Amino acid sequence: MTKDRSFIDQVAANTAQEPAVVSRVIEEFCLALRRELEEYKGINGDYVGEQLHWDIGNRAFFHLLGFLDQFSEKYQWEPGSAREYVSRLFTEDEWKPFSQEYCRAKASDNPPSAAPASSTLEEFCSAAYACAMSLMSNADYVQKELPTVELPTDIRASIESLCADWIGTKHDVIHELDELQESSNIEDRIRRIMSWLGEDMVKLQEQVRRLEALATAEDRYRLAYLLVGESGGNILRSFVAAGESADRVLEGR
């Protein structure tokens, strides 16, 4: 850090508050802002244009819009970009509680009348989310490293297609999880999510088997086999955890 004081220390000094208090307020503000942006219905569903300035006041609204303007100029942001930053700065054990916190917050605001026990459903949401994000992060990693390994053209194309499938499944799963809490048929949505993830696991296993046979025949392809195999192992572990969580929810129905 190049500044003499941290961001939190500066705000604490400006507001005559303890840094710990400021830190907690910032955390709660960011969580609440994310939830409101997602859940707001309003007239046209435009939270920023219709409601945000009432929620945070004119001064905060003005400077937040300025931040968003500068952000849009400096960053090429797409769905899933957050995962790249999170995976770069934190371990899964560090960020997973934040994901669980968000699922719990949504569940407490939207308790389904016929929902399974909230703890098991929250556990599934967290595990399925982690699996979806594992698909995204490992797809990104394989895509970045793929040009550095030797492969036949057709096998390379099949791996690129597999990565595209992983990214697509990630988006589908996250969307389905967003709808899960308000659904009248939670079991069907859980089965749908696990079916999508399961299809990708089948494709992954087939691809790894092909690469294993290729690497056994010619050692120059071993790096490609390790690249996809190790990334696939990361995904498979998160898939198993999601599947076990899904079973617990469905068994309780």
Image (spheres, rainbow, N blue to C red):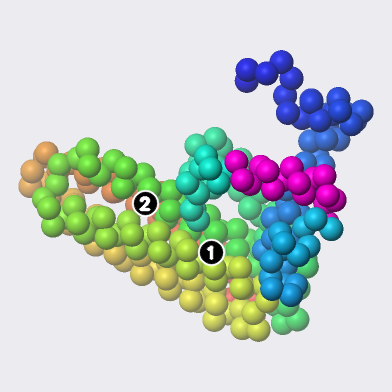
Residue situated in front as seen by the camera: 248 or 218:
218
Q: Which mark is residue 139?
A: 2
Residue 177 drawn above or below residue 102: below
Residue 203: in magenta span: no
Q: Quadrant of the N terminus?
A: top right
Q: Is residue 205 visible?
A: no
Which numbered disc, 1 or 2, marks the residue that appears first in the sequence? 2
Tag 1: Cα neighbours inside 10 Å, few (<14), some, or many (≥20)? some
Residue situated in front as seen by the camera: 40 or 121:
40
Q: Which mark is residue 84?
A: none
Residue type at mark 2 is Ala
Q: CA distance from mark 1 to mark 2?
A: 16 Å
Residue type at mark 1 is Ile
x and y, in percent, of residue 94 in the image = 61, 40
Q: Residue at x 12, y 53 (%)?
A: 153
x and y, in percent, of residue 93 in the image = 58, 42
Q: Which residue is mark 1?
A: 174
Query: How would you classify the magenta stretch by its main secondary structure?
Result: helix
Residue 249 drawn above or below residue 3: below
Residue 179 drawn above or below residue 203: below
Please state the extent of the stretch shown in magenta in the rendering: 55-70
Q: Is residue 63 visible?
A: yes
Looking at the image, residue 67 sits to the left or right of residue 222; the answer is right
Residue situated in front as seen by the camera: 110 or 195:
110
Tag 2: Cα neighbours inside 10 Å, few (<14), some, or many (≥20)? many
x and y, in percent, of residue 71 in the image = 58, 43
